[in-house]
Image (tube, rainbow, N blue to C red):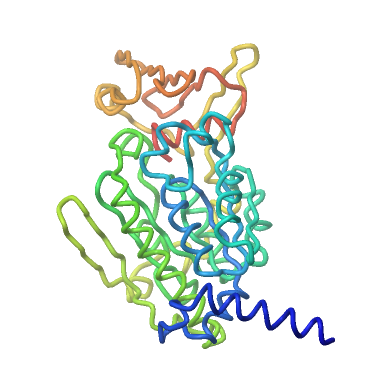
Amino acid sequence: MRRESTGNLQHLLMDNARYQKQILFTEIGEAGQQVLQRSRVLLVGCGALGCVLADAMTRAGVGHLRIVDRDFVELSNLQRQMLFTEDDVAAHLPKAVCAADRLRRVNSSINIEPVVADVEFTNIRGFAADVDLILDGTDNFEVRYLINDLSLDTGIPWIFTGCTGSHGQMMPVFPGQSACLRCLMTNPPPPGTTETCDTAGVLGPAISVIASLQAATALKILVQRSQTSGSTTCDVPLKLTIVDVWRGTFRQMDVSKLRESSECPACKGGERLWLEGSQTSGSTILCGRNAVQVMPVEKLRLSPGELAKRLESVGSVTCNPFLVRVALAESELELTVFPDGRTIVKGTEDPAIARAAYCRYIGT
């Protein structure tokens, strides 16, 4: 008993030394720090946003961090994904594994659980089964709407975040109490109609700013929900925050009453289209062609000319009135996109890789 007490005391002293500056922050204090060390967080995606979030949660002492990501580290990631190095690119390491290895060297007193997987309706419940909060570190709307459905179905809060070019957006979602993602946007933008990070680029500082705001909001939710037994939204502002670091602008839109004033099919109608799998992009392996066909949920009406212009920055593009074909510069994949959104991804027979490429270059 004496040895155990001595060990506990030493552990407490080490924690106090590690988190001293955070404990001195009145809104957290010793009680809040203990709450953080008991908290469990699911981080979906460990790209640019996810790296900042994972680092912040680890250094703050969140007790259990589950990092789920499907991708491997690439050279183009290093401009903004702060946890990775050239050695990781050369080793072709999965992002989740690489991040966990680096973060364990930052804080060995917490549990970091890497999961290399494509988050979809068949597995997301398992990933979120025992967590207090879900953080959006993704780069596509299909997964965000899936997280939104799960949040509404389980009552687990989540924080929506996105970043393209020089601007980012962030909004906390408290199921049953605040506006959800579908209150804000009933449906995701159709593929090929909006820019993505891979077609419009993204600035590292924009990622850092919006992800830091998300991380601060996450700590506030974890500490204050414990104090209120999870029955309220605490004093977290129910606002959509929009930042543009290039133009130096910061805006907040009050969305606190959006849920009451809208006819949200998810909040009020109980729809869980993404969680049920009915809104998931379909994919079919094309036998003998080393290719996968990806089908959007609904047929689209894309302009081949406009899409070709957007894809010029990512590879060699050919275009005619019937299709757009791009041979990606960063990989051996070739995408053939038809006006209805149907896309053949050549160079792989892995549906997850094909869907990832579709999301990156065409959209959700």
Report whether 55 appears left or right of 167: right
> Which residue is at 49% across, 65% downward?
158
Q: Residue at point 67% right, 67% down? A: 130
For the residue pair 170 and 5, the one nearer the viewer reads as: 5
Residue at the left extreme of this rendering? 247
Please tell me in which quadrant of the rendered image residue 216 appears: bottom left
Q: Which one is in front, 254 or 13?
A: 13
Percent x, y of residue 59? 50, 65
Is 186 displayed left or right of 123 in the figure? left
Task: Check the picture and name the quadrant holding the N terminus.
Answer: bottom right
Whether 27 is drawn above or below 144: the answer is below
Measuring from the top left, give residue 119's x and y in whole percent: 59, 47
| Front in this rendered view, residue 322 or 195 | 195
Position of residue 255 relative to residue 47, above or below, is: below
Q: Is residue 318 shown above or below 281? A: above
Q: Quadrant of the C terminus?
A: top left
Position in image of residue 234 (x %, y %): 43, 83
Total residue callouts: 0
Q: Which residue is painted at 34% across and 51% down in the image?
A: 207
Q: Give how far across and how far down residue 54 sits, in percent.
A: 50, 57
**Front position in the image: 74 or 154:** 74
Residue 166 located left or right of residue 170: left
Q: Quadrant of residue 229?
A: bottom right
- The answer to whether 52 is drawn above or below residue 255 in the figure is above
